[in-house]
Amino acid sequence: MAATGATTLNHIRHLMSVISERKGFDALCFGKMKLLSAETGRVRGEVEVTRDYLNAIGGTHGGWLSTLVDVGGSLAIASHGFETTGVSTDLSVSFLAPSGEGSNIIFDAQVLKLGRTLAYTRVDIFSGEKMVATGSHTKYVAREQERAAAAAK
């Protein structure tokens, strides 16, 4: 069952907290991320670009921006009340403009379609008014749908 209002915001905050406490790659992303808003099917967050997120020429690293598409899309899926969000089947990112150290990056992640087996998301990434990247993320969610259906009974 999908969460609503403040429940969705609290659910996403809880998931971010649990993930940031783990060791590993995801913890690096969530540790510095600030949740701006969450509603069913949409999550917005903010991260300041630090030296850790730069490439060799001082710009925001494309791999890090791709991770924001992955993480943002996953959080948008989780906003439907899921504790887990399945596995990635496809991820695509277009890099549109540069950003660098000290930039405040805002991501806006939306679920475009949540089906029985696949979830499709779009994530737009901004630095100020400038869109620096946009991406799509598809995840296999059949097990998550089954868990949600069982929990609703």
Image: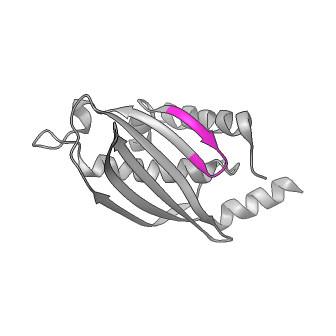
On the question of residue 55 being in view, the answer is yes
On the question of residue 23 being in view, the answer is no
Name the quadrant containing residue 59. Answer: top left
Residue 40 sits inside the magenta stretch: yes
Q: Position of residue 111 (x, y in %)?
A: 58, 58
Give me the residue at 26% from left, 55% from top: 96
Q: Position of residue 140 (x, y in %)?
A: 57, 67
Q: Is residue 64 left or right of residue 91?
A: left
Q: Is residue 72 above or below residue 5?
A: below
Q: Position of residue 43 (x, y in %)?
A: 55, 44
Image: magenta residue range: 35-42
How is colour applied across the structure in the image? one colour
Residue 136 sits inside the magenta stretch: no
Q: Residue furthest left?
A: 57
Q: Position of residue 47 (x, y in %)?
A: 38, 33
Q: Is residue 17 left or right of residue 25?
A: right
User: Quick one: quadrant of the C terminus?
Assistant: bottom right
Give me the residue at 39% from left, 59% from top: 135
Give me the residue at 25% from left, 34% from top: 52
Residues 27 and 54: in front is: 54
Name the magenta segment's main secondary structure.
strand
Give me the residue at 31% from left, 46% from top: 64
Residues 23 and 61: in front is: 61
Q: Is residue 112 above or below residue 97?
A: below
Name the quadrant containing residue 146. Answer: bottom right
